[in-house]
Amino acid sequence: MKDMRNSSVELLRFVFIYCILLIHIYGFGGESYPDHIFELGHSFTTLHHLSLNCLGQIGVTGFMFISGFYGIKTKKKKIVNLILITIFYASTIEFAFNPHIKVGDTRNLIHAFDLNWFISCYIVLCIIAPIIEAGIKQISQNIFKNIVIGLLLYFYGAHLIGLSNDHNFTFLLTIYITARYIKFYPPRFLFENAATLACTSALIIGGLPVLFSMAGFSHYPIMRIIATNNNILLLVLAASIVIISSRKVFYSPIINYLSSSVLSIYLITDNDLILHPLTKFLYSHIFNFYGFFLILAVCLVCIFIDKIRILLFDFCYHLRHHIHI
């Protein structure tokens, strides 16, 4: 067995990417973002969608927490491949769905990873991961803990005080380093009460915004904190779920095979040429139960597309290798 990654964690990565697509549907599929989402809590027939949107915010936090918990093993080939994959999807989608593209516009696709804030930040994080790892090994636990506390106060605390929502490199870095600390120095309380913390944080994340919305506070600035990805409870929920999944060790070649392409779901569906028509279509169906299966189908189609992309990349690699020989 070539890939012995824990399949429960790999399945969790898929769930987190599914959550990212879900919140994009709620956010971009409707009108007047984000107010129309907060107003879903006004009706008993739609309030569960507000809860799902709030819980779905865990997507980026959870995906990055996994990277931090297990560490990013930086390799030149991995970074180059990530950049090439991003450029490939940006270029393919641009030529396929933009009838007005000009030859001169293609030079912008060289910087395709800048079209996706997450990919741009993740590439930078991959580059500096060895530096972070070396620094962790050179400092004491107490210093490391103070750094983590400082980052948490800087990012989550500042956004709470300012009642603002944001996602950037600092966001990912804070999650990554926090996860590294938890991996290096496992907090006893977190590991012993992971299930309780997961249930409690999920209940607050999914329930509090609904209560605020029902009380008529859907347009208040506080909703942009408790109902968006800058809610620190999302970090607690992500940490708890990852810890629980890390204990449920099993190996499934099918899950691991499919999960190796989960990033393609983000790269394809987050492209503006795909994002807006796709989210509007899925939003029109999401209020029916089968809509969630449509989202699953979209994810699987993206994975299937990526497997074709892998075959194409392998063919080009072997062709290049053959020519050099």
Image (cartoon, rainbow, N blue to C red):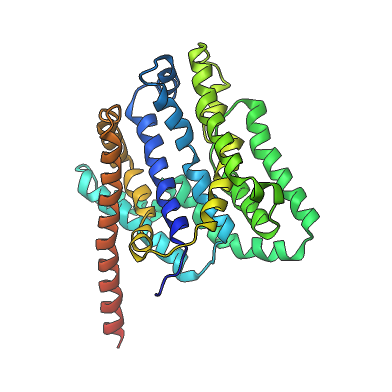
Of residues 117 and 144, which is closer to you in this image? 144
Residue 55 higher or lower than 47, as above or below: below
Residue furthest to the bottom: 325
Residue 169 shows in this picture: no
Residue 288, given in percent of the width and then of the height, sits at 27, 28
Q: Quadrant of residue 185?
A: bottom right
Residue 81 higher or lower than 273, as above or below: below
Q: Is residue 170 shown left or right of residue 188? A: left
Q: Quadrant of residue 281?
A: top left
Q: Is residue 182 shown left or right of residue 53? A: right
Q: Which residue sits at x=67%, y=33%?
A: 158
Of residues 239 and 31, which is closer to you in this image? 239
Query: Split into 4 quadrants, where in the image is the C terminus?
Result: bottom left
Q: Which residue sits at x=58%, y=28%?
A: 164
Q: Quadrant of residue 247?
A: bottom right
Residue 254, given in percent of the width and then of the height, sits at 33, 62
Residue 75 shows in this picture: yes
The tally of labels here is 0
Residue 225, given in percent of the width and then of the height, sits at 57, 28
Q: Which residue sits at x=43%, y=32%?
A: 52
Of residues 37 and 290, which is closer to you in this image? 290
Q: Is residue 40 shown left or right of residue 130? A: left
Query: Split into 4 quadrants, where in the image is the N terminus?
Result: bottom left
Residue 104 higher or lower than 253, as above or below: above
Residue 121, given in percent of the width and then of the height, sits at 51, 51
